[in-house]
Amino acid sequence: MSVLNISEDMVECPLCMEPLEMDDMNFFPCTCGYQICRFCWHRIRTDENGLCPACRKAYPENPADFKPLSHEDLHRIKQEKRQKDAQRKKNVTENRKHLANVRVVQKNLVFVVGLSTRLADAETLKKMDYFGKFGKIHKVVINHSTSYAGSQVSMLMS
């Protein structure tokens, strides 16, 4: 019944729906093997009827199967979790690299090409005479690259 390997999905207590802590992973208070967290087990024994929610047998004074994790096991599990998190982050980064040259279309983002350098000023473009009349502008980014004819401007509007 012992569970030392934590699966990808965190196991939840079926009663309180909270993720089981590392110490609770090896906690089976009833002989039927129904696993709950120690908090719920204590609450059932002290405040409720003291019966297992699965088989309705009375909980014994000591849990049927409980082996506290050693410091080495805790350290190993935490290290494995860190490695899995790092690998997951690396995979997410790898999956998004192909999007580096893609422009995402958003209904509140305006991309303007070909403005004269006289107008390519953030404060000028926010005025009511120019793009301010279309809505509140949160951010203006001006690209002075000469790869396009004129300046490029990106604006985030509400």
Image (cartoon, grey):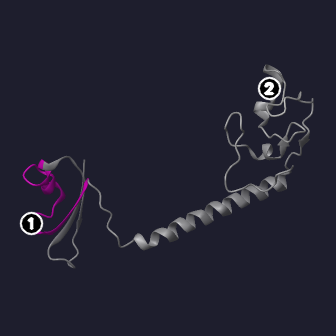
State the residue position of label 2. 44
Q: Residues within 10 Å of mark 2 (few under 14, many from 20)?
A: some
Between 7 and 153, the one lying in front of the other is 7
Q: Residue at x 72, y 39 (%)?
A: 13
Structural crowding at the residue carrying mark 1, measured as other residues with C-alpha within 10 Å and reported as few (<14), some (14–19) or many (≥20): few
Percent coordinates x, y for residue 105 in the rendering: 30, 61
Which is more foreground, mark 1 or mark 2?
2
The answer to which of 42 and 131 lies nearer the viewer is 42
Give the quarter of the image for residue 52: top right
Element class at badge 2: helix
Q: Give the residue drawn at x 59%, y 63%.
A: 88
Q: Which mark is residue 118?
A: 1
Q: Is residue 111 magenta?
A: yes
Residue farthest to the front, as pictured: 55
Q: Is residue 157 left or right of residue 32?
A: left
Q: Is residue 130 above or below residue 89?
A: above
Percent position (x, y) of residue 131? 13, 54
Where is residue 139? Give x, y as percent. Answer: 26, 54
Disc 1 marks a residue whose amino acid type is: Arg
Callout 1: helix, strand or loop? loop
28 displayed left or right of 11: right
As rendered, which of 119 and 16 lies closer to the eye? 16
Residue at point 79% right, 31% down?
A: 53
Res. 44 image quadrant = top right
Q: Which residues are magenta?
A: 108-133
Q: Residue at x 35, y 73 (%)?
A: 101
- Relative to 97, 45 lies left or right: right
Cα distance between the residues tagged 1 and 2: 74 Å
Residue extending farthest to the bottom is: 147
Looking at marks 1 and 2 on the same chain, the residue that comes earlier in the sequence is marked by 2
Q: Is residue 46 above or below residue 11?
A: above
The amino acid beneath tag 2 is Ile
